[in-house]
Amino acid sequence: MLNANSISNPSRERRPAARLYTAYRGKETAPADGVFLIQGFESSVMLRLLIFLVIGLLALPLAASDESVLQRMIDAAEAGSTVVPEAGSYDGPVTIEKAITLDGQGRVTIDAGGKGSVIYLDTDGAVLRNLHLTNSGESHNKIDAAVQVRGNFNVIKDNVIDNCLFGIDLQQSEHNIVRRNRISSKPVELGLRGDAVRLWYSFGNKITDNIIRDSRDTVVWYSKDNTISGNDAQGGRYALHFMYSQYNKVEDNIYRNNSVGIFLMYSDSVQIRNNIIASAVGATGVGIGFKETSDVTIESNKILYNATGIYLDVSPYQPDTSNRIHDNLLAFNNIGVRFLNGWHGNEFKRNRFKGNLTEVVVSDGGSANNNAWDGNYWDHYQGFDRDKDGVGDTPFEHYSYADRIWIDVPSAQFFNGSPMLEVLDFLERLAPFSPPELVLRDKAPLVEAGETL
């Protein structure tokens, strides 16, 4: 209320405003008639804070909507329906727990944002197709993958998977189809990458026609009755690795420029047919390797340009079993076949050994003649075929001469094929200082290689 005193004393009116700053700074308490100005200042600050708070609250539902829109579409879909998202990028991870078809039509990206797996597929009978799946987490313990499968009769096909630690992981899952996917891991060192396809206690699955680049392995653990066919894998460690897995089929794959082509450990009754396995040329490079593995069929494969074509370590392991190695081309390898020791029980029939630096080696200096060698082609064979039946008139015999030097001293293998070792080998053959070791004898060697490459 205005009064005479306030009207007649103009300086009294200005005093509260002059002391407002010092009151706000806490240096002086404003008089009672300045309270309204101080409260007005505080109200202005509070109003601004309130505006920012409201804006933030309004923005939160929009962000949450962006992160969950694909998940909400999946959750709203009925079993048996097809979900076709609009073209664009969607945030993952997402979880599918019903039998739906998720079709990206080649226009949809699901990005996990570097956390977890892109898709968790925990159902039977779902289909994932035509999607771009990217940017999984980096945890090996959690198996951060493009797709984690925990179900049966699912189909995962025609997807592009990149920058995902693991590609497709199947655990205790049966009768799934993984077909025509393009898979690559994260751009890290080889040993730190994840596996392109991983099967663990999974039966009856079909892994077919996938293109795999720069992943670590494809692994099959404790799994049986699976088919791995028509895949093309390059730039990995093990193109295909079996552990404790039986009755699987491996057919028509192309494995190039990996550290190892196919390796079987404690995995019996596997069939390996019509594959091309080439250029495993590292220090431990192997085309096809066995460790304590029995009843395996290796048939009609092309095993080319590897450090070792076929490697056998105490195989076959089970009593009264054999490994059948028939009709393969082993060409241009440093060593065609390497035995860890003088083991027995393998059948080598109608194989073609062409252009290898050494056909057969036994690492412990023993003999490979405890295995069956029958009707193979050896380009080092120097006999004749006078009756023109396609079979040499005399057996092919392979002895160990100067190659013992680099077998006993592996670093000397660098000089294999050099003039010095070639001269030593010639002298050993011409006038050996001690009887050479007979490595193998093929009683009916072929004199024609037939089709090669």
Image: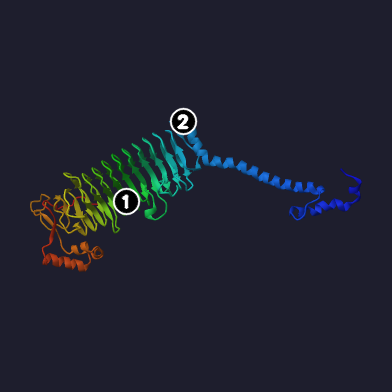
Q: Residue 143 appears at what percent x and percent y?
A: 40, 46
Q: Secondary structure at mark 1?
A: strand
User: Disc 2 marks which amino acid?
Assistant: Glu
User: Disc 1 marks which amino acid?
Assistant: Tyr
State the residue in front, 255 or 314.
Answer: 314
Residue visible at 20% across and 69% down?
Answer: 420
Q: Is residue 160 left or right of residue 340?
A: right
Residues at marks 1 and 2, CA–CA distance in whole angstroms: 41 Å
Mark 1 closeness class: few <14, some 14–19, many ≥20 residues within 10 Å: many
Mark 2 closeness class: few <14, some 14–19, many ≥20 residues within 10 Å: few
Image-quadrant location for residue 404: bottom left
Image-quadrant location for residue 64: top right
User: What residue did someone put label 2 on?
Assistant: 78
Callout 1 touching callout 2 (CB < 8 Å): no
Residue visible at 19% across and 50% down?
Answer: 351
Q: Secondary structure at mark 2?
A: loop
User: What residue did someone put label 1 on?
Assistant: 238
Scheme of image coloration: rainbow
Q: Is residue 312 left or right of residue 42?
A: left
Residue visible at 62% across and 44% down?
Answer: 56
Q: Is residue 340 left or right of residue 56?
A: left
Residue visible at 20% across and 64% down?
Answer: 405
State the residue in front, 43 or 335.
Answer: 43
